[in-house]
């Protein structure tokens, strides 16, 4: 299995989804070697995690997020920064060297970042190739064409794959529309969440200011995610302006990092709500969990979201969710509010309704939680296992 990240060195949902899927697969006696482009201690005992580095590289350090530079420390002590496309080229060659020495039944590659390496493995080993699409370039570009080089890599990987896994019907349709891939080649396998994996909260929330303000009658709306065009945060801030006009005792907590960080801070100031919107930057651990739990409503206003695990995480930590209809999670989560990402007025109406009614908030969460505790990655593991067995049987026929 080829991937670009795993927790705790993940920038978002891609690494978490890979981790949980592999955990479900290994319960089914599937032996996985997960190959990363960097070295780190992940504390994973249910599969082999291997790091591949180019020749002459002693150490690799990520700069923090999935689509950014890596710092390579060479054996002579010098340092070199490589952009995302140069990293892929090195990863491809390093993976090719690794697989020459090993035997695999199947190669399973996650997202475009690993497709070049996956195609090289298929060429060397002549084994079935499964490509797992967590997002396409048009998603990441906010429904525009995006980077043509990325599109070329995606197209080649999708065309050469023996089977494509899409994380939602939304993503499947994007693959069909963007690349002309036959629907019969694409299998939808939804992401999920396991309630037992949610770490318990303690009694003291780290957001003491927000806790104090809530005791004074304020309500908190939360968003957790990358601050990038795909996630639709400018629309959320415009809706926030309307919400605050209706319900002045509303605060917004924005947790995450990304290229829109300073743009969003400026937008909040220009809208006159800078004192009501708090930006925390990227958070992990307790700070991350407490951000969900301090909220009265979690909002995911994504322009195009292939799946979206964050609303499920929010529900696990006690907060109901409002999601855009342009998301994969909206296909499987019934007990949540839904809105078109572009409908700022309706988004504001739904947010205002929740922050003005604790009864509505509590009822939304109660029904969402009943649905949440039934979710599991086991079904995804079962579907992927069946896919493996089908293609291996074809190879042996």
Image: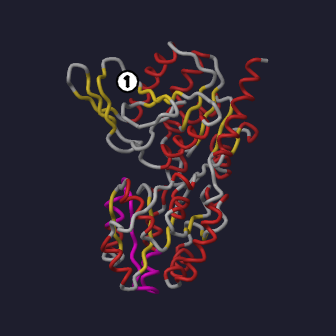
Q: Is residue 202 above or below residue 168?
A: below
Judge left or right: residue 47 versus residue 252: right
Q: Categorize mark 1 by other alpha carbons within 10 Å: few (<14), some (14-19), many (20+).
A: many
Tell me the quadrant of the picture where the N terminus can be found.
top right
Tag count in the figure? 1
Instruction: Give the image location of residue 201, x and y in percent.
Output: 43, 62
Instruction: Give the image location of residue 337, x and y in percent.
Output: 60, 71
Q: Which residues are magenta?
A: 239-265
Residue at the far left: name it: 77
Q: Pick the residue in front: 136 or 192.
A: 192
Q: Which residue bears the numbered disc 1?
A: 53
Tell me the quadrant of the picture where the C terminus can be found.
top right
Tell me the quarter of the picture where residue 324 sits.
bottom right
Residue 377 on the magenta span: no
Instruction: Give the image location of residue 106, x and y in percent.
Output: 63, 24
Tell me which residue sits at (39%, 76%) in the image: 251
Residue 255 on the magenta span: yes
């Amino acid at each position: 299995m080829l991937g670009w990240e795993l927790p705790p060195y993940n920038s978002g949902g891609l690494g978490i989804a890979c981790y949980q899927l592999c955990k479900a697969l290994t319960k089914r006696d599937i032996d996985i070697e997960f190959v990363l482009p960097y070295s780190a201690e992940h504390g994973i005992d249910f599969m082999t995690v291997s790091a591949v580095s180019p020749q002459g590289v002693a150490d690799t350090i990520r700069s923090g997020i999935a689509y950014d530079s890596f710092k390579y420390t060479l054996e002579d002590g010098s340092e070199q920064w490589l952009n995302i496309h140069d990293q892929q080229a090195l990863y491809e060659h390093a993976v090719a060297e690794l697989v020459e020495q090993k035997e695999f039944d199947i190669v399973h590659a996650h997202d475009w970042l690993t497709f070049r390496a996956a195609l090289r493995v298929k060429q060397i080993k002549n084994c079935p190739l499964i490509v797992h699409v967590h997002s396409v370039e048009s998603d990441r570009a906010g429904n525009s064409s995006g980077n043509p080089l990325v599109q070329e890599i995606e197209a080649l990987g999708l065309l050469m794959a023996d089977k494509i896994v899409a994380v939602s019907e939304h993503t499947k349709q994007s693959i069909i529309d963007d690349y002309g891939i036959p629907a019969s080649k694409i299998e939808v396998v939804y992401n999920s969440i396991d309630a037992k994996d949610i770490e318990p909260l303690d009694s003291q929330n780290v957001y003491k200011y927000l806790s104090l303000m809530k005791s004074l009658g304020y309500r908190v709306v939360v968003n957790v995610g990358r601050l990038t065009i795909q996630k639709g945060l400018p629309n959320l801030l415009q809706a926030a302006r309307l919400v605050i006009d209706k319900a002045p005792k509303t605060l917004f907590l924005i947790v995450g990092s990304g290229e829109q960080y300073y743009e969003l801070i400026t937008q909040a100031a220009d809208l006159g709500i800078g004192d009501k919107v708090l930006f925390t930057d990227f958070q992990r651990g307790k700070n991350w969990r407490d951000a969900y739990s301090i909220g009265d409503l979690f909002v995911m206003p994504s322009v195009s979201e292939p799946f979206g695990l964050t609303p499920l995480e929010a529900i696990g930590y006690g907060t109901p969710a409002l999601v855009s209809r342009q998301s994969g999670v909206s296909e499987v989560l019934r007990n949540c509010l839904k809105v078109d990402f572009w409908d700022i007025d309706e988004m504001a109406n739904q947010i205002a309704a929740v922050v003005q009614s604790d009864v509505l908030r509590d009822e939304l969460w109660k029904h969402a939680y009943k649905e949440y505790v039934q979710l599991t990655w086991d079904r995804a593991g079962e579907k992927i296992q069946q896919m493996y067995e089908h293609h291996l049987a074809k190879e042996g026929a």
